[in-house]
Amino acid sequence: MIDPARPLVVRAPAKINLTLDVLGKRADGYHELASVMQTIGLHDTLVLHPAPAGEFSLVCDAAELSGDDNLALRAARLICDATGVQRGVRIALQKSIPTQGGLGGGSSDGAAILTALNRWWDLGLSKEHLIALAAQLGSDLPFFIWGGTARVAGRGEIVIPLPDAPPLWLVVARPPISIPTPAVFRALTPADYTTGATTDALVARIQAGTLPPLNDATLLNALEPGVLRAFPAVAQARAQLLAAGAPCVRMSGSGPTLYAPFTDLAHAAAVHRAALAAGMQVWLTTTAPAGF
Ligand code: C5P
């Protein structure tokens, strides 16, 4: 039992897409996805302070994220509206996940608030109920209610948890541009659609407790070719990571953030050092299990 009268510290991890198949465009304008998503060690930190009923406020070290439309704040309001609970919360949010990068930072903050307030206020909502609330706030939020390794379908709201994949070291690189998600999906053509076979194959391996060799055949992002074509800064960052010694580089989500997976820390650390020396914005981290 957590004491609702005392502040609560919560961690909100970033995610990567190990695979992201885009199966096609739906009648509602969204795209049908098949993806293996994975939380990683890079995380934001939130501190929740008790506040009088009806008071919802947020301070953030990134001033531009302190607004009323921050997903963390919207999540707090939503769970109060949905349950009728008479509570308030002051949220302090320290951002470490690069924003608008394809790592799901804002979505993770929102999902972390739903999960944390459910526990802090002892609301008793099931994971399924939390996922339904999360889906109202954005396509990427439901995954973070589970975290760890999961298969994601629909527009993102269908989450099937998988056993935690064997751990990987990751070099994560943020090219110096932001790309709005809707523009990336809008630029897709039927030639970019994929079958879902890459996601199916990876899911089978993870269910068997292993990972395949990680390469351009086993990891896929159907949004990546279009972004590489349209944004030379992303193509350049990818080339820099490969030149730094990464065997395989993939984009996460709608980008522009790239990641390179490794089974060996020494190899990952050498690529991280070389990328830093090349002036890139990079992080050395790991995949993170559910409940991280
Ligand atoms: O749901 P969310 O607000 O995160 O999605 C942002 C935009 O990304 C949508 O408005 C849509 O243009 C696009 N999108 C999509 N298919 C998905 C998820 C997002 O086309 N499965």
Image: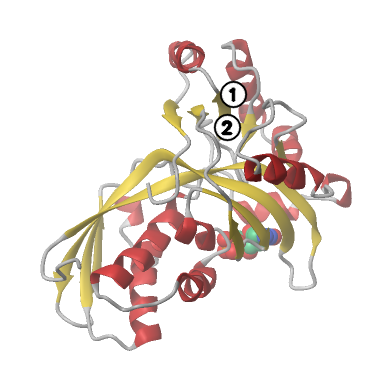
Identified at 87% across, 52% down, the residue is 190
Q: Nearer the viewer, residue 7 or 59?
A: 7
Q: Position of residue 19 (x, y in %)?
A: 68, 42
User: Secondary structure under badge 2?
Assistant: strand
Question: Dots 2 and 1: beta carbons under 8 Å?
Answer: yes
**Residue 157 higher or lower than 252, as above or below:** below
Identified at 60% across, 39% down, the residue is 209
Q: Which mark is residue 237?
A: 1
**In the picture, residue 262 is in which quadrant?**
top right
Identified at 44% across, 15% down, the residue is 269
Amino acid type of the residue tagged 2 in the rendering: Leu
- The residue that label 2 is drawn on is 258
User: Secondary structure under badge 1?
Assistant: helix
Amino acid type of the residue tagged 1 in the rendering: Ala
Residue 55 in sight: no
Which one is earlier in the sequence, the residue at label 2 or at label 1? 1
**Residue 59 higher or lower than 26, as above or below:** above
Left or right of residue 22: residue 11: left
**Residue furthest to the front:** 208
**Residue 204 higher or lower than 78, as above or below:** above
